[in-house]
Image (spheres, helix red, strand yellow):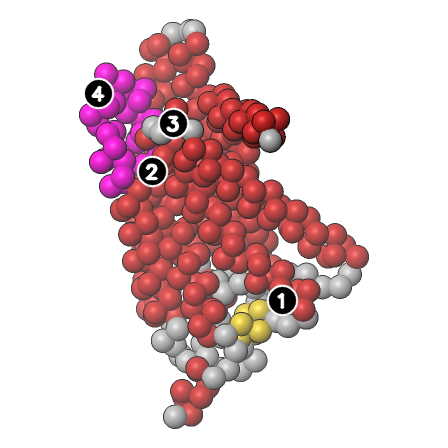
Amino acid sequence: MAWENQTFNSDFILVGIFNDSPTHIFLFSLVLGIFTVAFMGNTVMVLLICLDNQLHTPMYFLLSQLSLMDLMLICTTVPKMVFNYLSGRKSISLAGCGAQIFLYVSLLGAECFLLASMAYDRYVAICHPLRYSILMNQKICGLMAAFSWILGSLDGIIEAAVALSFSYCGAREIPHFFCDVPALLTLSCTNTLLFERMVFICCIIMLLFPVAVIIASYVHVIVAVIHMGSGEGPRKAFGTCSSHLMVVGMYYGAAMFIYMRPSSDRTPTQDKFVSVFYTILTPMLNPLIYSLRNKDVARAFMKVLGRGKSGEQIA
């Protein structure tokens, strides 16, 4: 009974990353601005791809799933952080902590597999254009997206369930701005070595396997583009692929830095600021990278704006 009271009736304390100094107030305002841009950018991307029939292709369907994942990811951590900072309350319930772990682990895993699917889509489009409608038909594309969500969710369920099965004691202060598993494990009263090894193995599957698919896909793409020679085709192919590679580099680099280092090399400050990069900054950059470098998205946006202006004039 004492263990139940200790584990289930006590909230955790999220230390956060900001204090009341002028510098930190400025940084908090900056994060709030980034969140606003990320929220609006990803929402616009999802709506544009849904509303414009010309964007109903496998590439843009997968891109809409990426935007949806980014939207959910940034909403998993930032609103709670903002509420805690503005209210002065730093607590989070065990259920809230479990929900955060499940959501962000699921979304991170799902994005890993989705980015690999997007790389495969570009490989088929550039290396096998005549068979593209067969190899990337609507059914296959839907299955890729569905498996990304399912595999990510399975990882989230396992990590959340095991992490919350441990007993936690002491000050119960998580040195982070959200319930990150590595930060939470530092508070455990029990030995978590086996679980940490399991998390490392999951990271190999969730990170390195998709990276291998992405590398293999783009090696074939680069070879194919080189053989195309000069012209509009190679430039367009390089433009699309470079956008994807920028996203992959930022996302996987930060995730590997957090989850594939030994615990002895970790510091709370490093983990917090790298986490800001892949949970807040990357979701903002993704829609900007894809929209600013993509004429189809820009055209769809102007088309929707034109409809809105026409509707206002008729009214």
Mark toward the start of the polypeptide (3 vs 2): 3
Q: Amino acid at mark 1?
A: Asn
Dot 3 and dot 1 residues touching (CB under 8 Å) = no
In the displayed structure, 241 sits above or below 286; it is above
Mark toward the start of the polypeptide (4 vs 1): 1
Task: Give the alpha-carbon distance from disc 3 to disc 4, as whole Å.
Answer: 22 Å
Q: Residue at x 29, y 52 (%)?
A: 150
Does residue 220 appear anywhere in the picture?
Answer: no
Nearer the camera: disc 3 or disc 1 = 3
Q: Is 227 positioned to the left or the right of 309 in the image?
A: left
Crowdedness near tag 4: few (<14), some (14–19) or many (≥20) residues, C-alpha within 10 Å: few
Q: Which residue is mark 3?
A: 53
Q: Is 237 positioned to the left or the right of 16 in the image?
A: left
Q: Which residue is mark 2?
A: 116
Q: Secondary structure at mark 3?
A: helix
Determine if the magenta segment contains residue 59: no
Q: Secondary structure at mark 1?
A: helix
Nearer the camera: disc 1 or disc 2 = 1
Q: Which residues are magenta?
A: 116-144
Task: Give the alpha-carbon distance from disc 4 to disc 1, as whole Å.
Answer: 52 Å
Instruction: Give the quadrant of the N terminus.
Output: bottom left
Nearer the camera: disc 4 or disc 2 = 4
Task: Give the alpha-carbon distance from disc 1 to disc 2, as whole Å.
Answer: 36 Å
Given residues 104 and 274, the one toward you in this image is 104
Nearer the camera: disc 3 or disc 2 = 3
Does residue 166 appear anywhere in the picture?
Answer: yes
Q: Which residue is mark 1?
A: 84
Task: Give the alpha-carbon distance from disc 4 to disc 2, as whole Å.
Answer: 19 Å
Q: Secondary structure at mark 2?
A: helix
**Residue, far bottom:** 1
